[in-house]
C-alpha cells in the first residue's frame, strides 16, 4: 500500500515513523512538507529530504515553498520559480502548495491569485513536477462559530474557484487536490471538474472529515470512485511534527497513527459500521458505514496510481541538475 499524504517533518522520529508504516501495512509513502517561518529554510523540507535519502526506494517528497520575505517585503527571499528549480535539484518529486488553505494565505500574507504564485505553475510545467494543492477546508469552517466565520478569509466558493482556475489555466501540469478538494458534500461538482480537467487527481486525506458526507451519498460516491479510480490517491494526512504546528497536533502515539491509516482504508474497502471521528458531524451522525468499493478500485487507489509517481521519480533522477527556464505571464 502507498500512503500518498504523510506529513513526516521530524527526522528524529524516523524509528517511530517506520513503526507506523509497518503497523499500517504501508510499503511506500509520499512525504509532504509544510511551510513554517520558524524553521530553518522556512519549511520542514530538510526533514522530508533526509528521510528520502535514507530510503529513496520507499519515499518521494513534496517540498514546501519558503514564504519568508525579501528585504523590501515585496516578495519571497528567493523567487518561487527559482524555488521550484531548487526543490527539483535537491531531490523532491513535487511541490506542496498550501496557500489554498485560507488560514495559510493569511499567515504568510501571500495572495494565491498573484503572478508570484502563477510562477510556481509555470516552473512546475517546465520541470514536469506535480503540484499537491490544498484548496479550501471543510465547508463547515465557514459556519457560525467556525474559524472562518468572521468574513476575513476567502469564502469556500472562492477557494474552489481559485483551484479550478489553476487546473484549467495549466492543463499540462499534474495537480493533486488534497482532501477530495473538500467536495465530498458536492460530488457533482467534483465529478464535473474531473471530467473537464484530465490533469487533476484527488487524494483521500484526511479520511475523518468526509466519512459522513460520502456515506450519506454513498451511491454517487461509489460511482465516482469507480469511474475515476485511476485518478484517486490514497492518503491518510497523518502528522508527525516536532510539536504542534499551525494548531495541528503532532500525534505522538504510533498505534493511534497506524490505526487512523487503517481506518481510512477500511472505510473504502469494507462495509463495516464505524465511529464518525469528525467533530462537525459526529454529534448528529455518530456512526458511518464504509463504501466497500470493488477490489480493483481499491488496488488502483491504494497502490497503482501512486506507483506511477515513484516511477517518474526514477526517470527524472538523471535530470536533477538540468537548468529550468521559468516563463512568466499574467492571468
Image (spheres, rainbow, N blue to C red):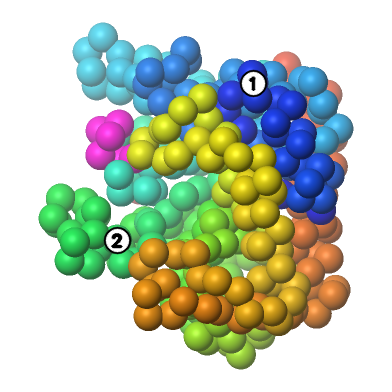
User: Overall secondary structure of the magenta stretch?
Assistant: helix
Q: Is residue 26 left or right of residue 327?
A: right
Outermost residue on the top side: it is: 71
Instruction: Give the CA separation, mark 2 to mark 1.
Output: 32 Å
Relative to 128, 161 lies left or right: left
Displayed quadrant of residue 238: top right
Q: Position of residue 142 (x, y in %)?
A: 25, 63
**Callout 1: helix, strand or loop?**
helix
Is any atom of residue 144 visible in this view?
yes
Q: Identify the disc placed on residue 47.
A: none
Check disc 1: other Cα within 10 Å, few if <14, some if 14-19, many if 20+: some
Query: Which dot marks residue 141?
Result: 2
Local SS, label 2? helix
266 up-or-down from 95: above or below: below
**Residue at the extreme bottom of the image, as rendered:** 219
The span shown in magenta is 104-109
Q: Is residue 158 magenta?
A: no
Residue in the picture at 53% in, 30% down: 241
Q: Residue at x 30, y 18 (%)?
A: 69
Q: Nearer the viewer, residue 211 or 113?
A: 211
Position in image of residue 32 (x %, y %): 59, 37
Query: Looking at the rendering, which quadrant does residue 268 occupy?
Result: bottom right
Q: Residue at x 46, y 70 (%)?
A: 183
Q: Which numbered tag is attached to residue 11?
A: 1
Amino acid at each position: 500500500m502507498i500512503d500518498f499524504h504523510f506529513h513526516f517533518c521530524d527526522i528524529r522520529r524516523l524509528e517511530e515513523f517506520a513503526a507506523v508504516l509497518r503497523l499500517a501495512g504501508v510499503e511506500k509513502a509520499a512525504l509532504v512538507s509544510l511551510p513554517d517561518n520558524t524553521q530553518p529554510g522556512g519549511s520542514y523540507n530538510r526533514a522530508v529530504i533526509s528521510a528520502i535519502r535514507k530510503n529513496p526506494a520507499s519515499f518521494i517528497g513534496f517540498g514546501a515553498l519558503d514564504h519568508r520575505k525579501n528585504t523590501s517585503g515585496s516578495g519571497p527571499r528567493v523567487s518561487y520559480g527559482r524555488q521550484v528549480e531548487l526543490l527539483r535539484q535537491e531531490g523532491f518529486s513535487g511541490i506542496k502548495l498550501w496557500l489554498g488553505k485560507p488560514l495559510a494565505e493569511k499567515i504568510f500574507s501571500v495572495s494565491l491569485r498573484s503572478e508570484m504564485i502563477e510562477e510556481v505553475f509555470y516552473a512546475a510545467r517546465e520541470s514536469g513536477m506535480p503540484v499537491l494543492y490544498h484548496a479550501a477546508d471543510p465547508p463547515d469552517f465557514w459556519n457560525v462559530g467556525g474559524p472562518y466565520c468572521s468574513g476575513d478569509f476567502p469564502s469556500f466558493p472562492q477557494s474552489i474557484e481559485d483551484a479550478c482556475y489553476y487546473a484549467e489555466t495549466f492543463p499540462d501540469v499534474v495537480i493533486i487536490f488534497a482532501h477530495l478538494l473538500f467536495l465530498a458534500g458536492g460530488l457533482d461538482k467534483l465529478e464535473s471538474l474531473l471530467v473537464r480537467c484530465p490533469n487533476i487527481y484527488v487524494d483521500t486525506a484526511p479520511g475523518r472529515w468526509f466519512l459522513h458526507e460520502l456515506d450519506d451519498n454513498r451511491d454517487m460516491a461509489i460511482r465516482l470512485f469507480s469511474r475515476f479510480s485511476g485518478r484517486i490517491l490514497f492518503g491518510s494526512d497523518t502528522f508527525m511534527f516536532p510539536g504542534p504546528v499551525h494548531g495541528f497536533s503532532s500525534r505522538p502515539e504510533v498505534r493511534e497513527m497506524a490505526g487512523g491509516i487503517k481506518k481510512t482504508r477500511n472505510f473504502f474497502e469494507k462495509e463495516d459500521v464505524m465511529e464518525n471521528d469528525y467533530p462537525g458531524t459526529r454529534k448528529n451522525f455518530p456512526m458511518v458505514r464504509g463504501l466497500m468499493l470493488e477490489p480493483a478500485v481499491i488496488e488502483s487507489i491504494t497502490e497503482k496510481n501512486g506507483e506511477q509517481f515513484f516511477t517518474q521519480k526514477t526517470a527524472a533522477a538523471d535530470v536533477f541538475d538540468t537548468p529550468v527556464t521559468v516563463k512568466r505571464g499574467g492571468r
